[in-house]
Amino acid sequence: METPTPIEDLAQVATRWQDTMLSLGKEYKQEPEVLKIGGVPIGTLGNFSASIGKAKSKKTFNVSAMVAAALSGKEVLNYTTDFPEGKSRILYIDTEQSQNHCMIVMHRIMKLAELPTNEDCDRLYFLALRKFNPKERLAIIDDAISQIEGLGFVVIDGIRDLVYDINSPSEATCVISKLMQWTDEYQIHLHTILHQNKSDENARGHIGTEINNKAETVIQIEKDKDDNNISKVESVHTRSKDFLPFAFCINAQSLPELLPDYVPTKKSVGRPKLEPFSPYKDIHEAIHRKALELAFDGKETISGYKTLEEELTTAYELAGTKFNHNKIVKIIKFLTNKRMVVQESRGIYRFMPDYHY
């Protein structure tokens, strides 16, 4: 049985429709255009945008340039910003990297903004939320956005880590609703980052679908087909006109550098060719370790190949990824070749937790 809604809450809801009703007798201001690419608006106050791209496509390098432009007021990697007075502070949230890696990103932003890298900037707040669970991360972000005065720009590097299940419609709706609430209530612009599927160019999971439906602008970062050192940035969809694609490389100072003369390779028609499954490339080491710990939990060894296969099939699914029989066979071959799992004698398998990956 559902818990009855308190009478005072019902009264509050009953008056909300009046507060949200528009009137032809009023004039409503155009939201300030605060983020542009090559002079084309991609972000306004009160809305959110997103970057999508496959793993290692340099999404974080790209968004670092975006933040540096906001911090410096200068053009950085084709990005320019124009935040109103009193909206100059920036909140950067990283959900998946260690504090050391987050410091690398922060140093990169400061270098791109041509600001000192050995002292804190009172306009940039950087949060590393890797150690928290999704519910805690949401609460921390909510608290930070509500308390930082003069906040104009928020970046969430890893929105996937704000949900437990990337394919949960209810979780996706909840998180995207929070983005819309934060941006509207505090009149900020928020930019978030999400991985694409390995097999196509769609943003991952149900939350990816919601981002495509609700974001003001979605941009894609992808590696050049002929040169892995080059990343291309282009528009997936926008509420204004599309910006011209551009590309960058990582220079000797480990900073993204614009390639003004870049000519993109034409895309072939149809679905992209699917590369063969690789347990090394397609599964993160952390997933392998988690699955192995689950499979060998409470036992020193597993007897029999068939039992090992069954245990690993269940363990990888519990770790967040489901594989069919053929892929599990490839995974077992990979694990034994890397000596993450050792066959001590015929049919006896032992997990080696101190493996070298």
Image (tube, rainbow, N blue to C red):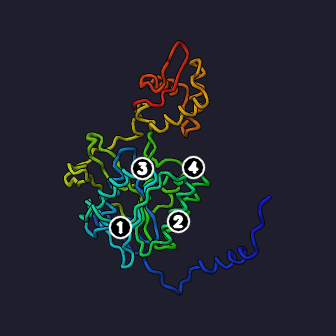
In the picture of the structure, the residue carrying the numbered disc 3 is 97
Query: Tag 2, which secondary structure?
Result: helix
Between the residue at mark 2 and the residue at mark 4, the CA separation in whole angstroms equals: 18 Å
Between the residue at mark 4 and the residue at mark 3, the CA separation in whole angstroms equals: 17 Å
In the picture of the structure, the residue carrying the numbered disc 2 is 142
- For the residue pair 191 and 150, the one nearer the viewer reads as 150
Amino acid at pointer 2 = Asp
Q: Name the image quarter holding the C terminus.
A: top left
Q: Is residue 202 above or below residue 110?
A: above
* Marks 2 & 3, CB-CB < 8 Å contact: no
**Circle 2 Cα neighbour tier, 10 Å, few/some/many (<14 / 14–19 / ≥20):** some
**Circle 3 Cα neighbour tier, 10 Å, few/some/many (<14 / 14–19 / ≥20):** some
Amino acid at pointer 1 = Leu
Mark closest to the chain's N terminus, 2 or 1: 1
Instruction: Give x and y (percent) for residue 313.
Output: 57, 30
* Marks 2 & 4, CB-CB < 8 Å contact: no
Residue at the far top in the pictured view: 346
Residue at the far bottom in the pictured view: 25
Q: Nearer the viewer, mark 4 or mark 1?
A: 4
Query: Tag 4, which secondary structure?
Result: loop
Instruction: Give x and y (percent) for residue 217.
Output: 42, 61
Instruction: Give x and y (percent) for residue 222.
Output: 34, 47
* Marks 4 & 3, CB-CB < 8 Å contact: no
In the picture of the structure, the residue carrying the numbered disc 1 is 35
